[in-house]
Every structure is written in C-alpha cells, then in structure tokens.
Amino acid sequence: MKIVSFVRPFEERITTGALLGDGSEVLDFHAEAAGLPHPEELLGWFDLEAPSLQEALALTRKLGRDQGLAGELREAGAVLPTAEVRLVAPVPRPGKVICIGLNYRDHAEESGMEIPERPLVFSKFSSCVVGPEAEVVLPPGSEQVDYEAELGVVIGRRAWRVSAGDALRHVLGYANVNDVSARDFQFADGQWQRGKSCDTFCPLGPFVATADEVADPHRLRIRLRLNGRTLQDSS
C-alpha cells in the first residue's frame, strides 16, 4: 500500500489515504463510505498495531481486485482523482526525525571523509518536514544550501532497545526524503543541528510504501535529478 496525506479542494484539513492502481486515484480513509475505523489521532493511521491501519490495508487490496467496489466508492466520493487533491508530507508531523550521517559509502568518499566505525546520528525538527511539491525556503545568511536524496524509514510500532534481528518488524514502510542542508551553517558550527534543521529542510514523499511492497530495502536505487541532470545515483 502507498500511504499518502492530502488536502481536498476548498478544505484545510489533512486527510490520510492510499494511492490506487497507477497512482491516478486516491482512497480517502476518512470518507464515511470507506467504512474504516478512525484512530484518535492522525498518526494512528501509521500504527502497525492499530485496527485502522490493518483494515485500510485490507480495503486497499480488495479495491485492486474488485472494480465494482471501486466504482461504488468512486460514486460515494471515497475514491477521487489524485490530480484533484494536494499531496502533503505523507507523515505530516512525525514525532521525531532521526538521521544517519555519511550513510552512503560513495558520498563519504567523495567528501574525503572516512567511513564511520559507528553510526553518526543527528536529528531534524518535525517542523522541517514538508510535502513533495512544497518550496524549500533558503535561510537568510546561508549561501551553500545543498540537497541529499535519502531513504526514509517510517517506524510503525513503539520500540525500545530492539535487537538488530527484530528491527524490520517495527518498520511500517519507506519513503523518499531530501535531507536539505545549509553547509555553511553546518561546518561553521562544528555540529549539524542548525545546518540540517531549518524549516522546510526535510521534503518527504509523495507516499510511504508499506514494507510488504519492498522485498529488500538494501537493494533500493536512489537517484536525485536537478533540472533533468542526474546528480546522485546510488543504493
């Protein structure tokens, strides 16, 4: 399932749903005709232990097989064209954004940095997260804002001290992330928080692909194109 968050025309409320088929239509989880139980808060749709997520997954799979049901929900307004809504970050306000620095070997090598012996951990504020088509606001005083295409891993189960062998059981899915950085802030400060955490510095989306759609997350190709020119191509 490809989970999205979106805003309907003439509305301000963020709605959770799923892309259907080739992505040209979206199922609105909140629509009455969908018949899904609603979680108490928006992030409840991303909880692997919540019945709302499991029933949404089952309904999305059923719609792929039952065109009659899809037609009924289309008429009821629960399925609508993706072009008619505005996609926002699929996880609109994550509780925390944890990042791993120098996590791509070729990026570390091109930067002239040694491969870390242990994970280099930093964070971004939740206010950094914006949708796939949102503008990135350049902070005053910075002249070296940079891009980094990253694989986002969305955690879907409350976890603490999880073993490596059990880690993937806690993953809801995966998403595209742009780890935007103000390099002049980052290197002048001697630590990364300010340079990585300016507002809008974490574009996310357009969707979260649930883990059942990704056979091996270690074999995903990650590319970044700027004005048609490929600037990153890695795994």
Image (cartoon, rainbow, N blue to C red):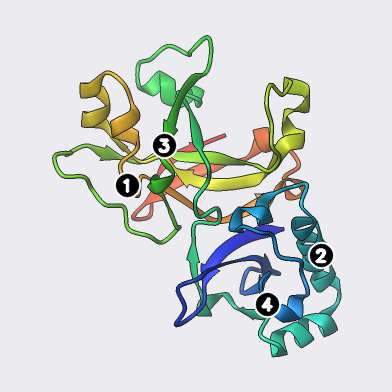
Residue position marked by numbered label 4 in the rendering: 31
Question: Is residue 121 positioned above or below 126 on the image?
Answer: above
Q: Earlier in the sequence, mark 3 or mark 2?
A: 2
Q: Residue at x 69, y 21 (%)?
A: 161
Q: Earlier in the sequence, mark 3 or mark 1?
A: 3
Q: Amino acid at mark 1?
A: Asp
Residue position marked by numbered label 1 in the rendering: 199
Residue position marked by numbered label 3 in the rendering: 124
Q: Amino acid at mark 2?
A: Arg
Q: CA distance from mark 1 to mark 2?
A: 36 Å
- Callout 3: helix, strand or loop? strand
In this rendering, which labeled residue sits more in front, label 4 or label 2? Answer: 4
Question: Is residue 53 positioned above or below 219 on the image?
Answer: below
User: 69 or 52, which lies in front?
Assistant: 52
Q: Where residue 196 sits in the image (x, y, percent)?
A: 34, 35
Q: Earlier in the sequence, mark 4 or mark 1?
A: 4
